[in-house]
Image (tube, helix red, strand yellow):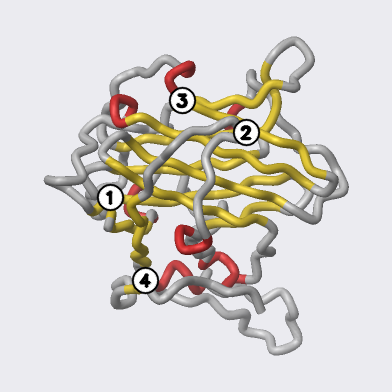
Amino acid sequence: MPELGTPASRFSAPRPSTKVAVSASPKDKAKDFIDPTFLFRFEIEIKRADLEWGSKGLSLPESHRLPSFGALSGQRIFSDVRMGWSEAGIGLHVSVSGKRQLPWCRETRLDESDGFHFWIDTRCSPGIHRATQYCHRFLYMPAGGGPRRERPVASLIEIHRSRANPKPINPEKLTIKAFARHDGYELCGIIPSEALTGFSPSDQNRIGFYYAVIDREFGWQTFTVGPEYPVTEDPSLWGQAVLV
């Protein structure tokens, strides 16, 4: 059984008015159950880090590893996700292993590409259903850029149905480095504070948060609920993170 979290992980009371649909026939094997992660609001801690960029990019220790509660609904755990923060921004380190196929990455089809997709609401508004200017979606993928699609790509992606968008950012401001491995890849990056509208840890250290490591070979490894829900556009389905 994969490790789901750390002692810093916690969850709140069940969401109200939750219904569970069960097949009326005991012989029907295709019973419909609600995703167990939908029943709770999860909160984690993202720890402070130096965010020092070296020749191999950014390295974060085991203490910065984030849980994947999607395992509760049977998702495969195929990646190690770590994040840290400082006043300068947010850093990430992701490694994917066990693959037999190359990741599918296209700079012209970012929404569908393999890689690390994550969402941040710098003002943490869990009751809203449409994104505001404080809601961001970033993608870090190990390839897909350049004439031969070998260059790693980092990008801010517009959130569908959003009421407003964060300030635009030049993709070159998003630091990224990626390394191919025999059974997967490793990537790291830094999102500078200037790319995060409303980011002010000293005034607001709680953020809305969700991530998905998307892979055409393995599927989705998510922070909480999976793609069966409109999690890519509905901030009320995200969890929360406290910057400590």
Amino acid at pointer 1: Ile
State the SS at label 3: loop
Q: Is residue 132 above or below residue 107?
A: below
Label ID, residue 207: 1
**Residue depth check, mark 3 versus mark 2: number of the one nearer the observer:** 3
Q: Nearer the viewer, residue 234 or 149?
A: 149
Q: Which mark, by number, is residue 8?
A: 4
Lateral position of residue 179 relative to residue 40, left or right: right
Marks 3 & 2, CB-CB < 8 Å contact:
no
Identify the mark at residue 141; answer none if there is no mark. 2
Q: CA–CA distance between discs 1 and 3?
A: 20 Å
Q: Quadrant of residue 166?
A: top left
Kind of residue sitting beneath label 2: Met
> What distance separates the C-alpha of mark 1 from that of mark 2?
23 Å
Which comes sooner in the sequence, label 2 or label 4? 4
Q: Quadrant of the N terminus?
A: bottom right
Location of residue 165 in the rendering, given as x and y in whole percent from the top left corner:
31, 26
Give the label on residue 105, or none.
none
List the residue tagged with mark 3.
Answer: 174
Q: Amino acid at mark 3?
A: Leu
Q: Of 11 and 28, which appears nearest the observer?
A: 11
Q: Quick one: which residue is furthest to the front in this view?
A: 55
- Mark 1 neighbour class, 10 Å CA radius: few under 14, some 14 to 19, many 20 or more: many
Q: How far across and down, in percent of the image, does residue 172 sit?
A: 48, 16
Indicate which disc, 1 or 2, sits on the residue closer to the N terminus: 2
